[in-house]
Amino acid sequence: MAALASNPQILTTQGHSNHKKEQLWRKESLNLEKKCGFCCVKVYNYEKLGRSQVEKEWRLKAFWSNVSQPETIEMVPINDVDELEAVLSDARNLSQPIIIEWMASWCRKCIYLKPKLEKLAAEYNNRTKFYYVDVNKVPQTLVKRGNISKMPTIQLWKEGEMKEEVIGGHKGWLVIEEVRELINKYV
């Protein structure tokens, strides 16, 4: 029987010896890195008869995550109407949807969502491009082009027009899930 504790550093396995009918305990202490590298495992085998007979063993295990894909992709700023039109034209030529986050530097929710959207951009790296517009730093004609009234507003554009939007006034993880659903609908 194996049990994985809520602490990912401890794995305990309990088994029974067939010939001696003794209970054996095996404790593995794991030192794990986040992405890739090596894992040192120290194994102790205790017999129930006494702790004088302790068997120690060190193991070295290698593990690798998917390092070919970035974890985050920085969102590209759009600063004026001409840049927006160029982005929409490129997306139309590639027949890709784009995500635009309309934000403000004073908006806490906007600042909170941006890194989460950059992680989402890494998930959809070659299928969708992610951009942001800081409404305080751009001409109002650009803000009117997006028809923005609340912050943060996350819009999905495809074929030169806005298809759907999410107004992110609620919890961040819900907003990200809604954006993920939008992307999956149009990709």
Image (spheres, helix red, strand yellow):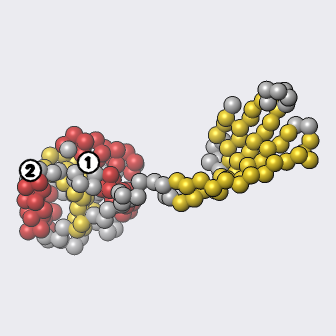
Furthest residue toward bottom = 137
Q: How many marks?
A: 2
Residue 145 appears in the figure: no
Across and down, in percent, residue 172 comes to 39, 51
Nearest the eye: 121 or 48? 48
Q: How many C-alpha atoms fall within 10 Å of the one at disc 1: few (<14), some, or many (≥20)?
A: some
Which quadrant of the figure contains the C terminus?
Answer: top left
Q: Position of residue 89 (x, y in %)?
A: 7, 59
Q: Nearer the viewer, mark 2 or mark 1?
A: 2
Residue 8 rendering spot, x and y as whole percentages:
62, 48
Question: Residue 84 occupies which quadrant of the picture?
Answer: bottom left
Q: Is residue 133 left or right of residue 85?
A: right
| Residue under label 2 | 159
State how far apart marks 2 and 1 are (Cα). 19 Å
How many residues crowd mark 2 within 10 Å: few (<14), some (14–19), many (20+)? some
Q: Nearer the viewer, residue 22 or 107?
A: 22
Reading the chain from its start, which is encountered first: label 2 or label 1?
Answer: 2
Q: Secondary structure at mark 1?
A: strand
For the residue marked with disc 2, what is the amino acid? Answer: Glu
- Give the image quarter of residue 103: bottom left
Dividing the picture into quadrants, the one containing residue 138 is bottom left
Identified by mark 1, the residue type is Val
Tell me what residue is drawn at x 69 percent, y 31 percent. 1
Per the image, label 2 sits on a secondary structure element best described as loop
Instruction: List x then y, in percent, for residue 183.
Output: 24, 45
Q: Which residue is mark 1?
A: 166
Residue 158 visible here: yes
Q: Which residue is at 82% across, 32% downward?
A: 23
Kindly identify the residue that appears in the image at 30 percent across and 56 percent down: 121
Q: Residue at the spot x=57%, y=59% of the render? A: 38
